[in-house]
Amino acid sequence: MCRNIKTLFNFEPPVTEDEVRAASLQFVRKLSGFNKPSKANEAAFDAAVDEVAAVASKLLYALETNAPPRNREEEAVKARARSAQRFGAR
């Protein structure tokens, strides 16, 4: 999985449209191999991002869990600690 795509389900506050779009953009970039598509591929690239975002939103709002929502700030602190342990403090 692409390291830049973050888990978006079951957080408080809930996921925003911008977060879903950012993850969708990262996913399409990974699949296509383009960070920024050429003019010839721009329309297809943008359409793919829109479609992935729509499907991702539909999925996130359809999922159910009994687990309590996770706190974004606490999870970010844990992620930074894991990163520091994995790559060393910088």
Image (cartoon, helix red, strand yellow):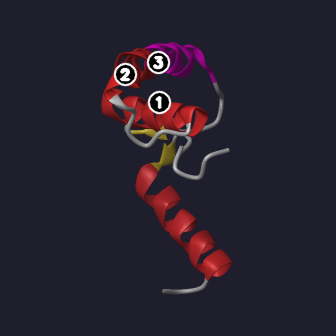
Front residue of 36/25: it is 36
Q: Earlier in the sequence, mark 3 or mark 1?
A: 1
Q: Is residue 76 above or below residue 18?
A: below
Q: Earlier in the sequence, mark 2 or mark 3?
A: 2
C-alpha gap between disc 2 and disc 3: 14 Å
Front residue of 41/21: it is 41
Local crowd at mark 2 within 10 Å, few (<14), some, or many (≥20)? few
In the image, the segment drawn in magenta is 51-64
Local crowd at mark 1 within 10 Å, few (<14), some, or many (≥20)? many
C-alpha gap between disc 1 and disc 2: 20 Å
Q: Is residue 7 above or below residue 66?
A: below
C-alpha gap between disc 3 and disc 1: 9 Å
For the stretch drawn in magenta, what is the main secondary structure?
helix
Which residue has dot 3 on it?
A: 48
Please check the rendered image and state whether residue 57 is part of the magenta-colored stretch, yes or no: yes
* Residue 59 point in image, percent of width and height: 56, 17
Which residue corresponds to the image point at 46% horizontal and 13% vertical from the top-left? 51
* Residue 11 point in image, percent of width and height: 48, 39
Quarter assignment of residue 14: top left
Q: Earlier in the sequence, mark 1 or mark 2?
A: 1
Which residue has dot 2 on it?
A: 40
Quarter assignment of residue 16: top left
Q: Residue furthest front?
A: 40
| Mark 2 secondary-structure assignment | helix
| Mark 1 secondary-structure assignment | helix
Name the side, left or right, on which 58 lies relative to 16: right
Which residue has dot 1 on it?
A: 24
Which residue corresponds to the image point at 41% horizontal and 23% vertical from the top-left? 41
* Residue 30 point in image, percent of width and height: 57, 39
Contact check, label 2 and label 3, Cβ < 8 Å: no
